[in-house]
Amino acid sequence: MGTDPEATAAAVFTALADPTRRALLGELAARGPATATDLADRLPISRQAIAKHLALLSDAGLVAAEHGERRRVRFRLQSGPITVAQSFLAVLATEWDQRLSQLQGHLEGPGRTVRDR
């Protein structure tokens, strides 16, 4: 992943939008690094489909491929992009909180509450 936090967050959100990719990440989080074949044995998804999803997760920086013996490629989780996406959401949440507070102040006006209306 590049150093652009907004692009990183967008790639993470795109990757997480698919339930199959979320399931793959859940498996890797629960059981540790695994090959596409290992994941196909655990989930009701073909190995080919898993390989395509893992490629997208890899492009988003959420998994890293580790090349091992006999051309086996194991995938492991990468937490960096998730942290970037969390920071992006935290900024949005702060901005929303500020806007909602301003709206509440406007609606209440001096000496009034929203319940008075």
Image (cartoon, helix red, strand yellow):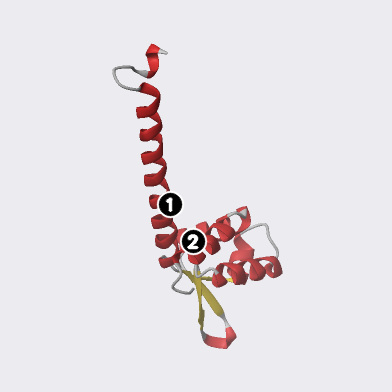
Instruction: Give the camera-side residue of 77 and 10.
Output: 10
Residue 16 picture location, percent across and down: 56, 56
Q: Residue at x 69, y 66 (%)?
A: 49
Left or right: residue 17 versus residue 30 is right
Q: Amino acid at mark 2?
A: Ala
Q: Amino acid at mark 1?
A: Leu
Q: Disc 1 marks which residue? A: 89
Residue 53 picture location, percent across and down: 63, 66
Q: Please report whichever mark, 2 or 1, sits nearer to the chain's N-terminal start.
A: 2
Left or right: residue 27 versus residue 52 is left
Q: Residue at x 47, y 74 (%)?
A: 2
**Furthest residue toward left:** 111
> Pointer 2: residues within 10 angstroms few (<14), some, or many (20+)?
many
**Furthest residue toward front:** 110
Give the numbered dot on residue 9: 2
Residue 25 picture location, percent across and down: 52, 60
Q: Secondary structure at mark 2?
A: helix
Q: How many marks?
A: 2
Q: Give the CA separation, mark 2 to mark 1.
A: 9 Å
Left or right: residue 92 versus residue 74 is left
Q: Secondary structure at mark 1?
A: helix
Q: Residue at x 54, y 68 (%)?
A: 60
Instruction: Give the camera-side residue of 99 and 81.
Output: 99
Instruction: Give the camera-side residue of 55 and 81.
Output: 81
Left or right: residue 116 versus residue 58 is left
Give the numbered dot on residue 116: none
Q: Relative to 99, does residue 76 appear above or below in the rendering?
A: below
